[in-house]
Amino acid sequence: MIDMDVRTRLNAEQKNGIFFLLLSKAFERIAFYMVMAILMQYLTNGIGVEAKTAGIQYSLFYGMFVVGSLFSGWIGDVCDRIKFVKLGFLMMIVMYLLFVFIPNVNWLVVMVLLIMGFGHAIITPNQIVFLGNIYNEQGKEIKALPGFIWYSIIVSVAAMLAAFLANVLKNQLGYLAVFIAAFVFAGLALMCFLMFKKAYRKLDLVAEQKEDQTEVSIRRINKLILVAMISIGVLIRFVLNQKNLSFTFAMRDYLPNSIDLSWFTDGLLPYLSIMFLLIFLFVVSRLKRMNWKVIFNFILLGIAICVLACTLVLGYEPLSNIISGNVVFLNVMIMIVLSDSLLSSVMFYSVYRSSPLKHKGLFQGFSFLIVGLSSYIIILGVKMYENIGATVSFLILMGIMLASGVLMFGVKKSIGKE
């Protein structure tokens, strides 16, 4: 495999494009997370929708975002992706504004939520394709990973800022102020995207070629990587999403009632995630050489850290006789966040990098579908914990990660032979 220098300089248009694309993503995510933070409360307390009905409407909104991502990625592949994303922004902006005036009519609320969800579904997978495209990788080059790490950092910061803003606006000015603020942030996101478009149109990009000129051997390698990422993606996300469920339940059940770690899990973990991503970005940016072997090593490291976290939970009884029990679970939660920080951006990048040139939107949409489905099936972890107990549950979670690691190691060996 050919090693590529990840510190290859970007030209001015590439830098401008990446800056405005990420800034657009930041504003779009702030708008999205602000609405997500208060949507259930608004439906039930703001316009008087029954709790059960509100839950269905919320699920339809999120479901449209998840399922719509698959179709919107494919549509972006076959039409003008920039025009399509602009349409998504306009749908999102108009729907936020409509929420200010919408009456409590069930079918109308559902329609607005579905259109708003599909607007976000248009934007998200296609923006990731733009991000990968603008690095202009070709052959066996691997240069875009830092951009994907920045993307994860932007999304994490936006989520934290949005939750704070939504809470302040709701308490001080009411629910409608949140939707008005979301409308403003969505408008800013569109403005930044139009600035990105100017830079993007000036570039002669490999991804915009009419024909895929990738070597047959590289296509074969990419196909193997893509199948592996899709296969293990839902499994890894299922385990990592247990952070706020099975891992939190175990902490509640094992630790004495007098010990409360909510100050750490609720207050500090989000900041730790951003810190880990920044450290990861620094490490990746300093690497002189990178190839698929390095990428797989990052994935295997993330899997190993998650396995170690499961092992600590399984070994809590003997460990608590040596060190404090709260120290054990502090380390468990830190390891889960560290594992997630390593795996999320690397796997999104790997799906982009290995997908066919003319179907990158489709497979990015598919990866978002996997993430969304894993969010829906996390309840299986709860059922598993309640029915078969903590020990067997964590043995299963550890087994899932070990199986993913074995598959990833096999792919790494196969690629090495190529």
Image (cartoon, grey):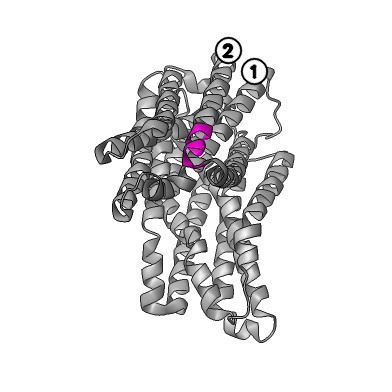
- Upstream in sequence: badge 2 or badge 1: 1
Foreground residue, 17 or 95? 95
Q: Check residue 175 for magenta coloring.
A: yes
Q: Kindly tell me whether residue 37 is visible in this rendering.
A: yes
Q: Is residue 59 above or below residue 2?
A: below
For the residues labelled 2 and 1, say whether their Cβ atoms are less than 8 Å apart: yes
Nearer to me, 274 or 215: 274
Circle 1 Cα neighbour tier, 10 Å, few/some/many (<14 / 14–19 / ≥20): some
What mark, if any, has residue 314 been given in the picture?
A: none
Q: Position of residue 208 (x, y in %)?
A: 48, 19
The quarter of the displayed image where residue 326 is located: bottom right
In the displayed structure image, the side of residue 112 where residue 390 appears, left or right: right
Residue 309 image point, x, y percent: 58, 68
Q: Which mark is residue 13?
A: 1
* Residue in the image at 43% along x and 70% along y: 396
Q: Residue at x 38, y 71 (%)?
A: 384
Tell me which segment is drawn in magenta. Answer: 174-181
Tell me what residue is drawn at x 51 percent, y 78 percent. Answer: 253
Seen from this angle, which residue lies furthest front?
173
Q: Quadrant of the N terminus?
A: top right
Closer to the camera in the image, 308 or 45: 45
Viewer-proximal residue among 122 and 240: 122
User: x, y (%) of residue 343?
Assistant: 55, 51
How many numbered discs, if any?
2
Q: Main secondary structure of the magenta part?
A: helix
Which amino acid, by three-letter code, is at mark 1? Glu
Is 118 colored magenta in this rendering?
A: no
Q: Is residue 392 above or below residue 352?
A: below
Q: Label 2, on which residue?
A: 202
In the image, taking residue 389 as reference, residue 64 lies left or right, namely left
